[in-house]
Structures are given as C-alpha cells and as structure tokens.
Image: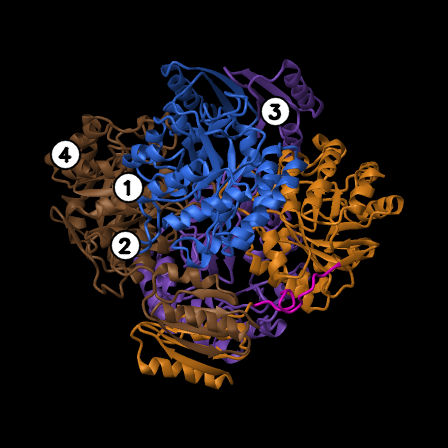
Chain colours: A blue, B brown, C purple, D orange
C-alpha cells in the first residue's frame, strides 16, 4: 500500500499518517519527492485500512500494490487448474464444448438436442431449469422437473450436464442432479450464493457480471475458492456497453488476460455475448483463437419456437457447421484436437 | 408490436409472418412502404412471441410498442404512490431523509449516530446488518446482532429503520426488525429475492443495479408489485460508466424520468453514487432540485475509523451542514418544508 | 512516479530500472516491501518516460503521482478564473445564462429568440452557424451568413454571442463575429483546433467529449491554456453510457469535481445532456444546485419546426418558467442573484 | 418512419400528425391497435422530419425503419468493395497486414522496421508523422519530415504506406506522400476532415471512434463516400467501456457485423484496442478468425525506447511469431493464404 501525500501538506499531516500505520502494527517507509511525499506501508493490511488512511488530512491518494485476490491468482497457484467431470476435462490442452438449449422445455426437446450436439462433437450438455428473467411475465423454467429431464438426457447420451442455480436454498437440490453448477451473470455478486456453492464438492462455472471488472470477477471466484471449493470455471459472456447492435459486447481480451493472471479455466459464451445466432460462429472461432478453454453455445431444435433466447440459438445444422471449423483453429494454436476430431468424426 | 420486413423480402416471407400471427390468435395489419413492408400486431402477446417472430425469414426487426411493465407505470396508476412508515411519509410533498452508517458496528456507534441524525432533521435511520462485500476478506456485517442494535436505536429515537436483506431466506428475519427492507444494487435482478419481498407487507426500497437501464429497474419493481406488495420505493445510486474519478456516475436524469413514467417514489443516494464525502452535499442538493422524494445518506461518528465506506460517509457536522441547505432548495421547487424545518430547528 | 516491481523479481531487474532512471538524469528511492519492491522516481519526467519504464523486465506497474495537467489545475492557480465578456462575467458569484437556438435558421428566428431570452433573463445568446451533424444528409448550418445574423441580434439586444467553430481554418472568421468561441464535444480532442483557439484573444468554451474522462477534458483545456489563452470555460453536456432513455447521461458530479480540481468556470448544458425538453428544467435546477457557474440552454420559437434538435429545445414559455425557478435555487447556495433578479424582473 | 401515438391520445392529436405528414408531401397509413394507434409514413423524409413529429401532442415515439446510411450499406452495394494500393488488395480473400511504429522517429528507426516487417510478411507499412496526443506536453510527431522518411522506406522496400491526417488543411500534403490516409478515432466525427478526404482519389482508412456506435461509424463513412471517394476501409480499434485492465475494449463482434451490413473492408487494430503488447497476438488471431480483412499492428525496434505507445508495440521477434500463426488460422476459415505464405516464407 502506498500513501501519496498532497503537495504542500504539513509535517504534522505526515506524522498523523505514520502514527496511524504504527498503531495498526504495520511498518512504513517515507520517501520525499520534489512535489509529493510518498509513504510505503509494509505488511498485510485489511482492505478497510486503505479507506481509513484516505480520510486523514493531507492524504491525496492511497494506492494498493498487492492484488486483492489471492487463491484465484496465478502467482499463488502457477499451474493451470484442470477440472475433470465424468471423464471430460476442462482447462487442459483440449477444448470443452458445452451445448444445449437455453431452457429445458420438454423431454423431446432436451433429448433430441442432447443427441444432436453429441453427434456434432459437444462434450457437455447445457440446459436451464431455473431461469432468471428480466420480466415477471416471462417463462421462468421448469424447475426440478427440468433437472430430471436433464438427468435423463445424461443417462442416454453419457454427456455430463451443467445447469444454473439461482439461490442458496436451491444449491443442494441442483447439486443432486447437475455435474457442474452455473452461477449466472446477474448473480456474480450474490455473495450468499457464492458462499454456498463454495461449500459443495462439484465444479462451479461463474459467469462474468454484466458490468463487472476482471478484478471483481476474480474476487467473486475468490469467495468460492475461499470456502474450499477449488473447482471454479470462469465464463466470459459479454459486458454492457453503449453499443446497442448486440445484446452485450464480448470482451475478447478477457480471455488472454484471465489466462495470464489466473490459473482458472476460461470458457466463452458467444450466444449471450451477442444475442444473435449469426454472430455466434465468428465469435466462437475468435474465442478459441484467443485461447479460450471451451465454449458454451445455445442450440435448439426449433429456435423460432424456443420459449427463451430463440434469436441467439443455433439450429442443429448451424452448430454442426461451427464444430466443423473448430479443429483447424484449435490446431493452429497448438491445442490438442485428438478427441475433438474423434468426436466430430465419429 | 410492429414487424419490419427486410427491403425486397418475398410475398412468401410476409405470408409466413402473418400466418404465425394468425396461429397465435392475434390480429394484424399490413402496410406497404416504399422500401419496407410493416406489419402491426394487434392484441396482447407474450414477450417470447417477439423473439420467435424475429427469426422468421425476411424479418428485419420487431419493435415493441407497449411498455413491458404495467403495475409500475404511471399510465396504469396515474396518482403518486405514497408510503407511510410509522408516521413518516415517502412520495408525498415532503422530503424523506434516511441517514446513518453504512454498517452497524456497535451499540455506541449506532445510538450516537441515530441521535445525531435525528437532531439534524433525518426522518429515517439507515444501517447495514448484512453487508454485500466485493471481497470475501472484508467485514461482512454483524447479522442479526446488527438488527437488534437498530431496533434499540429506533426505540430510543423513534426513527423508523431501513436495512438491507441479501437473500430470500433472510427476508422473514429482517422483516421482523426493519420498517423498510432494502434490496441492494447487486441484487436488483436477484429474482427469487424480489419474489420473496413481494410477499411481505412492509415497504421495500429497490436500488438501481449498477448497469441496469431504467426499464430493467421498473421491471424489477414489477416483480415485487406483481407478487402483491405495492409499497415499493426506488433509489438511484449511480451507474457504472467509463469515468473513474467517482465510484459510480449518478444518473440525475433518472429522477425526473421516474417521476414521469412511474408513480413510485424515488430517493437518491449520493454517498454510493460518488464514493467521496465531499461530493455528497452538492449531489444531494442537485437530487432534491431535480425532484427526488428524499435522500439516503451515509453518516458515521468517525468516518476514518469506519469498517466500511468511510471515504463516502459524512461526519455529524457535515450532515448538519447539508441539512441546513435543504429547506431553501425544497422550497424553491414548492415542496412542503414545514416538517423539515420543524425537525431541523427543533 | 512510482515503479512497482513484480513479486519475486530479481536484483538484476531492479538494477535495470534504477540504471534507466539514472541515465535519464532523475533520482530515485528504493523501498523494499514484504512482497513488492517500490522505486520512487524523483524529478520532472516526460510522459513517455513512464511507458518505457513499464516495458523493463520485472516491472509490474508504473503509477503517476503528479497530475498530468498543470495550468488547468487549482494547485497551480488557486483563485477562480473569472471571464468578462462585454460586461457579463462568468465564473464569479453570478450565474451566466446562455440561451438560444441550436442552429441559426433565419433573421426572424434568431431575432425573436434573442429578444425572448433576454426578456426572460438570459445574459448571453447562443446559436450555431457551423453545425456538426452525424449524417451528411442533415442540415449543416448557414455558415458565415449565420454569423452575420448573430451579430445583428447582438446589435439589437446587446447580448454577447457564443457560437461553435469546427475547424482550425475557420477560427479567424468565427472570432471576427463571436464573443465566445465554442469547441464542441466531438472536437474536444481535435488538437489542431485546440492549438488554434489557444492563440486567439477571446474566451473559448470547451465542451466535454462524449466519452472523455475529467482528466482528458482538463488536458484538452491545457492545450488551449498552454498556447497562451487563459480564458477557458468548461461545459458538461453529458457522457455516453449504456442508458438509452436519454441521449446522453449528464455527469452531475463533474460540476463539483471541476470546482475542486480546477480554477476554470464550469457551465452545464442540460439540453444536449438529455435530448428531451421536459428534462431540461429539472436538470438545469440540479446543475445550479450542485454549483455550476451557468447554463447553456436551447430555446426555439417553434421547436416542432426547428431544423435541428427540436425535441430538446424549450419554447419561450418553458424557458421563462425555468428562469423563474432559478433565483431561489441560486440564493439557497449563496450565489449572488441581484442581476439575475434584475434581469428577470425588468 | 413509424409514429407511435400515446395510449388514449385524442382524434385531434392523430389529425395533427397526419396533417403534418400531408403538408410535407408524404403519404401515410393509419393502423389502430388495442392500446396504441400507429401511423406509418411512406416516402423519403429528411432526418429532421422525425424530430418535428416527435414534438407533436399525443406522439409517444417515432421509429426510423430505413437505415440512415445508404452508400455504405450492403443493400445498396451487395458486392464486397476491394481496394488496390500499389498491387496490394484489401477486402478480397487475402489478409492485409499493416505494420510499423506508432510514430516515425528517425530514418534508422523507420527503415529498420520497414525491412523487418516486410521480411515477416507485412504488406503495408504504417507510421505516424502527425500524432494526436492527449497531453500538449507529449511528442507530437515529426510532421512533413516524417512523411519524407516514410516515402524513403517505401522506396527501399516497395511497401505502400499508410499514415494519419489530422486536419483538413493537411490533407493535400499527406496525400502527396501517403498511399492510404488514416482518419484517427478522435477524428471519426471531424466532419470537415471527412468531407475533405472524401474529395481525394486515394483510399482512406476510417478508425472507429472511442464511443461511436456501429451506425455512427457507417454514417461517418457515408460522409466520405457521399463526396465521391469510394475507397473507404474501416478499422476497429476498441471502444471505451468501464473495464480498466485494457486501454480500450476490442469490440470483436463489430467485425462480422460490418461484413454483414456493409460492403466496406474491415481491419482490426489489436495494439490500440488493448494497449498491452502481450495481448496483441491473441487478439490479432481472434480478429482474423472472426473474419477481419487485415490487421494494423504496432511494431518497433526497441519498444522500451519508443517515443509513443511503447507498451503496446511488438518487437521484431514478437511480430514474426504472430505472423507465423496467421496462415493456419486464415486457412481454417478459407481465406486465401498463398501470398501470405509466400511473403512469410520468402
């Protein structure tokens, strides 16, 4: 922590700051510049300590030097975290493909989609049972019935399943069925929910909040990690900007940044990032080219009849076309495509 | 709902759209422009209907004409909603002043603050018992102990209390103590929480999400209203923008817009909107001048020792100074200041 | 300037940094923290120096301590700058009201508006002759003819005039007619234009860019000041955010921030900030309450026939109503309203 | 254009609107919905017409159906525009690589860079002679001297050159030397500059403004096209968002969107989009994978000694590494890589 004093502050102001540091059991180091005095604080301070320093007279700014997250940082954990779910790995050299409908609507819908995405090479089945919806008048998902249909699809196809949990109270229920629990963008800072999924033994996929910085996202992951669950997957799904052509703006640079500052796997969701099915393919390719560990893609047998997110869902044919383009892109950046090829060709 | 067809679409494309409308039991009206055919859809359609129309071939855009919220709209409910809490009214011609610490820290802290803000003219006491914090390593609030201390302060001063609830499971507990339940910015789209506070009989203050549009905010209010709770207060607390000087950017225009499109009372929170105590006074005055029904202000006996949000908290003296400036501003725009004056002077 | 070294960097990395500082003729001070080494750079470095330091191995971050602008800062120039234009002062205790049409359209239009705004209490006449328009197919202004009509209106009413200049080549021409030259939001970082208006002897009003930070805005002012023109007025006119209800989002906090960090006068433009005439009055009042030195308001005899910006223009009656509310607000925050009252009542 | 009337407006309000349309020589079509009356306006209206309609009593909203740009749209010009500059084509099936330093600093610097980027496979040399800089105290470029050094580098290497022009007055001078004129992000809405480059016979690369929507960007292109210059190249270089980790946020979806709605070539600038050299490679690959027609990359012999933009510049080695990854990515999406391969291998 570095305290920058105002130009022309008094010696008394400086003493008040150093006394405050002293009393907190920390050490310091004063350095006199031409216009500003700088006081370096040595030792591990609580986050609140910064705030209280900033209010002392003569203080211009307090700058944090250490990152506020630890368990999520690559400094703390240099090797990539790899997550294994029913034999599918996420975060190693292979590309994980999670595909399926936005919402589970019926047995027929989820089963046919599961078969189709598996045939095209997907490795994990996605589908929403509890749906966060902007309006109270929209379809809110099938609830536990949806979870049962997902399990049925897993039984038939062997694909592990990922589905969203919206409230701490449902974590146990969802974890009974799901292989990976998803925390949605709107819940990225739902701290009681993060705490609760931090206490289960299953992988959690944490979507980036609509207007969350990369640092806030990693702090949200830190909540889960600090409760003891080290199986966290991050998912970039677009941020809110002034541009209205797309539903959100995919922050493609978040992918290489996360790979640099964290050890956690990062997945891209081009469906929510754009809101338009015809942008899903180019953005999926871009995400893989930039280093993403996988994709989360919405696929629906009849997008024009979907109860949710139809405009951004791929048909089976469109999904297959996307999958056919992935191996050469993955190979170009030296990802292992053996299993991708096997799955796609088989 | 208006369907805009692409320039040069075929007659067959148009028929597919009108058939789809027909089958949904709705009526339509076709209008041929020079470049575009426009199809007006008559009748009440589900929100999903728009999505499925957008995917039909030849459709360029589907435009919603009706507002997606109803109960929150002034069209539906032309008269201002007024909320009465232990004799204090919010949303009528008077200005409601909610003040107190960000977090309840101790009996001494909350009691002294309650006395000071009451003396300066505040009408409601605020204080957090459950605190949403960006980092898992920050102070998370005193929990139920904090609620008890708030009740104690109410008992002594007579000030009604407002405090945050973070999860559906806690709603009952918080409602036992609080006079107004606050839903925080990060939870504006925590739909299970909105549903749950929609089923209690106490007023709810709904803060605007960090990156929520005014329409999304009113849809979140609609969740609460549609569950039967008609005592909803809105609170503008700043939105996230590119500017980094302030913690958030206060969207001052949201105040007159809400007054125009909705009947719900609107309060401004200049403390969170700016993150800097020295900006609280000018923004509080601005909010009142633009028509806000009240203020939510952080006040702390020793901001430099506060466990949370010290930099944006007013001292007792600063709060008193702000309060002394309010009556002439309120009077200038013809708000009733009798009680404000009485309280400040008494 | 402070160099933060990476945790675990080598002694060699540190030496490379200190050598680089040495060679640039600057001094430094090293401080060893628990995880990070911090090197304080003493002396006046060029802005580029920071960039080159950031690329050295082992460097985590380089933090600027001094503000990058000087002439625009209150530290350098503690007293408020006051600008006098034909007897009207801007930046002192009075409120300056600039009003008039977005674009000068005809002799009749500008003369009638000038008379009406003067009668209502305006002190300066605004009107565009050169208009920046988003589309090449929109009305682009009357050019020099418009400047002549503005002069005619000044002759008749005595009101000084403010008008926009869009390109360095036109500065001389516009300065022949105008009392204050306006640099528009889209040109805030048109550096050749800033240089050129920095070399004239007339006041310049610099509007904030659509997506410019307060620091970038003050650096743009610094361009003008550093060329020798010390008569700069700033104008907050809304920034671009995700909210689409308003044309822009007025950053009301920019007003007290500018008053704190700079000595330059600051004016608010509620017309462009909102794009809707019915929001102009509440935002104008808010701006004055928060400490603005004046207003820039669009007024048109027939907004529904205006060639530009009709939807955000006030009618004569609406403008008069706004003016009638200003004196009590101004008085509430102790601004001098003698002349405002005189003008409004006379 | 569609006029949506307010729920419950009077017949008189409707007549006023239809009269106004009548008087403007346009036709209309009225359609009565359950809550709203909709009036479709037929015929080509001026953009201002919308504004005046919006002000009529009883009007809720006026919606534009036609796109406001024409010459830039794919509807008007279905085939891709291909630009040929000294034998290098942009916008056809090959990938154009523009590389070089941010600013021309010396003969030695630009010549060595030109040789290195050519050897690595670049097809066009970039370099700034006139530099827009945020602070007046930063290096502003060598001016005409820089243009001469660029020509010298072209003479030796045969690479066509691209360089920025900042003001209408300099267009002629820059066009004497440059093969492609660049209009920078800060000047995207510098309309006099757009007009002027619209009247030359050389290609113009138009960078997207920091906070410009895709529609505003295409309207800026329309300015150039409408003056008669049909050789316009677009360049996505990142937009301003709340995220501070990167200098800007690259809007990767802009690339496939532009390919869909316009016929103009689109280039990506990962250097400015990120501001960090280590993000340039992954974002360059992502841009190509998403369909970009080329790249604009900053390369410098000694980034740690660069006078501008050092932190985002690639070394020769890093650029060569990036170039070695491009052919397989390009091939994966079926772009022609013959010449890319030839150049890289020769």
> What residue is rendered at 60% in x and 53% in y?
D256
User: Quick one: label 1 or label 2, which is nearer the N terminus?
Assistant: 2
Q: Quadrant of residue B157?
A: top left
Q: CA distance from mark 3 to mark 1?
A: 41 Å
Q: Quadrant of residue D32?
A: bottom left
User: Residue D28: image x %, image y %?
Assistant: 46, 82
Q: Which residues are magenta?
A: D68-82
Q: CA distance from mark 4 to mark 2?
A: 30 Å
Question: Count of labels shown?
Answer: 4
Residue under pointer 1? B297
Q: Does residue C100 appear in the picture of this structure?
A: yes
User: Quick one: label 4 or label 2, which is nearer the N terminus?
Assistant: 4
Of residue A130 and residue D139, the one placed in the foreground of this image is A130
Please tell me whether mark 3 sits on a helix, a strand or a loop.
strand
Residue under pointer 4? B151
User: Residue A17: image x %, image y %?
Assistant: 41, 21
Q: Chain of mark 2?
A: B
> What residue is rendered at 49% in x and 20% in y?
A40
Q: Quadrant of residue C168?
A: bottom right
Residue under pointer 3? C59
> Dot 3: within a 10 Å radius of its alpha carbon, few (fewer than 14), some, or many (20 or more) residues?
many
Magenta run includes residue C256: no
Q: Magenta: predominant secondary structure element?
A: loop
């Amino acid at each position: 922590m570095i305290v920058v004093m105002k130009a022309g502050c008094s010696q008394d102001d400086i003493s008040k700051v150093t006394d405050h540091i002293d009393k907190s059991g920390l050490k310091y180091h004063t350095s006199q510049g031409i216009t500003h005095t700088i006081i370096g604080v040595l030792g591990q301070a609580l986050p609140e300590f910064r705030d209280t320093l900033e209010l002392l007279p003569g203080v211009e700014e307090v700058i944090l030097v250490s990152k506020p997250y630890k368990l999520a940082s690559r400094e703390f954990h240099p090797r990539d975290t790899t997550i294994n779910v029913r034999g599918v790995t996420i975060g190693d050299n292979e590309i994980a493909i999670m595909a399926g409908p936005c919402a589970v609507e019926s047995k027929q819908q989820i089963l046919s989609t599961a078969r189709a995405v598996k045939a095209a090479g997907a490795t994990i089945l996605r589908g929403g049972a509890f749906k966060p919806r902007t309006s109270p008048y929209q379809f809110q998902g099938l609830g536990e019935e949806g979870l049962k249909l997902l399990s049925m699809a897993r039984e038939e196809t062997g694909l592990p399943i990922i589905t969203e949990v919206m409230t701490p109270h449902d974590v146990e229920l969802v974890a009974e069925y799901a292989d990976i629990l998803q925390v949605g963008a709107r819940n990225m800072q739902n701290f009681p929910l993060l705490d609760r999924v931090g206490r289960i033994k299953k992988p959690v996929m944490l979507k980036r909040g609509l207007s969350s910085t990369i640092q806030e996202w990693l702090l949200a992951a830190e909540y889960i990690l600090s409760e003891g669950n080290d199986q966290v997957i991050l998912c970039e799904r677009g941020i809110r900007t002034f541009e209205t052509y797309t539903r959100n703006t995919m922050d493609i640079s978040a992918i290489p940044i996360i790979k640099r500052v964290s050890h956690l796997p990062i997945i891209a969701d081009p469906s929510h990032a754009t809101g338009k099915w015809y942008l899903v393919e180019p953005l999926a390719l871009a995400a893989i080219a930039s280093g993403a560990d996988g994709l989360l893609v919405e696929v629906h047998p009849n997008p024009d009849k979907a109860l949710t997110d139809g405009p951004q869902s791929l048909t089976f044919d469109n999904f297959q076309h996307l999958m056919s383009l992935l191996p050469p892109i993955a190979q170009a950046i030296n990802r292992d495509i053996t299993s991708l090829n096997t799955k796609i060709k088989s």
